[in-house]
Amino acid sequence: MTSPPFRFVFFDVDSTLVTIEGIDELADGNPEIARLTAAAMNGDIPLDEVYGKRLEIIRPTRERVERLGEQYRTSLVTGAEEAIRTLQEAGVTIHLVTGGVEQAILPLARHLGLDDRAVHAVRLQFDQDGAYRDFDRRSFLARPGGKELVVRDARARSKGRAAFVGDGVSDLEARAAVDLFIGFGGVAVRPRVKETADVYVAERDLRAVLPHLL
Ligand SMILES: [Mg+2]
């Protein structure tokens, strides 16, 4: 088997692998939260300004986060499972790099056949009774530029070319750390991402990224 042109492919999760924004789901339609999320993903406000603020308003319980994990599994973008499987069969190492909640992303990753070590997300802390306490404030992924650092760290372990697939401005920040940045507009179109991405995929099917990666 010849080796694939990309040794690593990094995927964002919300609005890239799935059609929902996890934090907006946790907010159960609170329009203030949706407004803050859109502003952050469009690059109008720095991520760290909204990250803790949104969680402090929502204060999601452990039970609600578990339910988000189920919502994720039923909200996959068309072709997402096939795209991941095809890349894995070609020998590509996949990582999920997201500012989403780790406890909800892990079941999605397992469903996709990915190892827990492939998941880079933000862990929430709960009280014994499952009430929200805080998020992991040490996480790079709750801050601007965090995805770039996570990608560089993952790549440091083995040689090879890397690509990133994502919809948001926080994804675009990882562009300097990869050889190819694919903007995905199949769920949400962010103008700054569309203008700056090396390749922009507007199809509503994630398999549309494969010709650029294999
Ligand atoms: Mg996203």
Image (cartoon, rainbow, N blue to C red):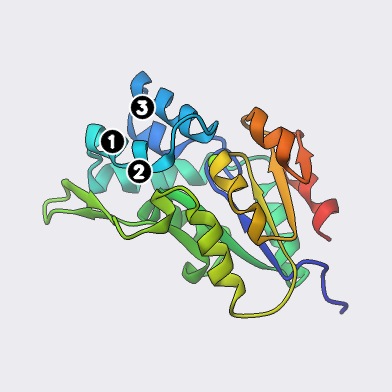
Depth check: give the residue in front, 60 or 33. Answer: 33
Q: Residues within 10 Å of mark 2 (few under 14, many from 20)?
A: some
Per the image, the residue denoted by label 3 is 33
Whole-angstrom CA distance, mark 3 to mark 2, is 19 Å
Secondary-structure class at tag 3: helix
For marks 1 and 3 on the same chain, the one whose residue lies earlier in the sequence: 3
For marks 2 and 1 on the same chain, the one whose residue lies earlier in the sequence: 1
* Count of numbered circles on the image: 3
Task: Give coordinates of residue 37: x percent, y percent.
Answer: 44, 31
Per the image, the residue denoted by label 1 is 53
Q: Amino acid at mark 2?
A: Arg
Q: Quadrant of the C terminus?
A: bottom right
Q: Amino acid at mark 3?
A: Ile
On the question of residue 174 being in view, the answer is yes
Q: Which mark is residue 67?
A: 2
Q: Residue furthest right?
A: 2
Quadrant location, ligand no. 1: top right
Q: Quadrant of the N terminus?
A: bottom right
